[in-house]
Image (cartoon, helix red, strand yellow):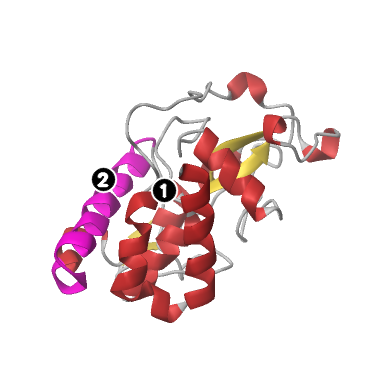
Amino acid sequence: MIEVLSLGGMESERYADVLSNTARAVADEGVSEASAALQPIAGEIWMGRLTTASRAGEERAAAPPRLRNETLRAQVFVRDGFRCTSCGGRAVPRSILVAIHDLFPDLVAYDVHYTRGKIHPVFWALAPEADHVLAHSRGGANVLDNLTTLHAVCNTRKSDSLVSDSLRAAPSSPNDGWDGLTSLYPALISAGAGEVRPGYHRTWSRRYEALMS
């Protein structure tokens, strides 16, 4: 076990590179061979503490709150090119990270509550959340135009306020080819993740397939 206490600005990119190589290896070679691609981050465990900007010093122990409309959440991620509009880093949908965990449970730990000591930091560094530009507590609506993509770690650290000034403009038509590994999701499911959580992965895979077509 490798304890990780903090997440720097480049961690999301390092994790994205490793998971991209791993997912491609699963598709091209198989799960056994793909485990080698995962070794640079294998066994890492999140042991750090995250604080909210609005409540300095207060630890965020649980997973960030999520928008309940799952299709709308996915629409936000697709529109923003699977990139965090705060730090600009690449994002990978939580369902795909869970699929990687399902294939490599001993290498990439997962806990639904994001508990310290039980989850790989990749979930904090890469998993996106659909957050309000104008905070919900200030009257912000649950509509596409008032939602933006933030990494779980970036979402936790920001203040509960009007955050539009701190967000980067996400491209309306991303052209860098990054798709959040959605094109490799079916390969992860076929390789065995679909046997662990068949309904969950089937639903999310179809949702992204429909939105990306």
In the rendered image of this protein, does residue 88 appear above or below residue 149?
A: above
98 or 120: nearer the viewer: 98
Instruction: Find residue 102 and report its horizontal and vertical position in percent.
Output: 38, 73
Q: Is residue 210 left or right of residue 140?
A: left
Question: Which residue does the numbered mark 2 point to in the structure image?
Answer: 17
Quadrant of res 175: top left
Residue at 38 percent across and 42 percent down: it is: 179
Quarter of the picture holding the N terminus: bottom left
In the rendered image of this protein, does residue 122 appear above or below residue 165?
A: below
Q: Amino acid at mark 2?
A: Asp
Question: Which residue does the numbered mark 1 point to in the structure image?
Answer: 6
C-alpha separation, residue under disc 2 versus residue under disc 1: 19 Å
24 inside magenta stretch: yes
Instruction: Find residue 106 and report its horizontal and vertical position in percent.
Output: 31, 76
Number of other residues with Cα within 10 Å of mark 2, as a class: few under 14, some 14 to 19, many 20 or more: some
Q: Secondary structure at mark 2?
A: helix
**Which residue range is magenta in the image?**
9-33
Residue at 31 percent across and 49 percent down: it is: 15
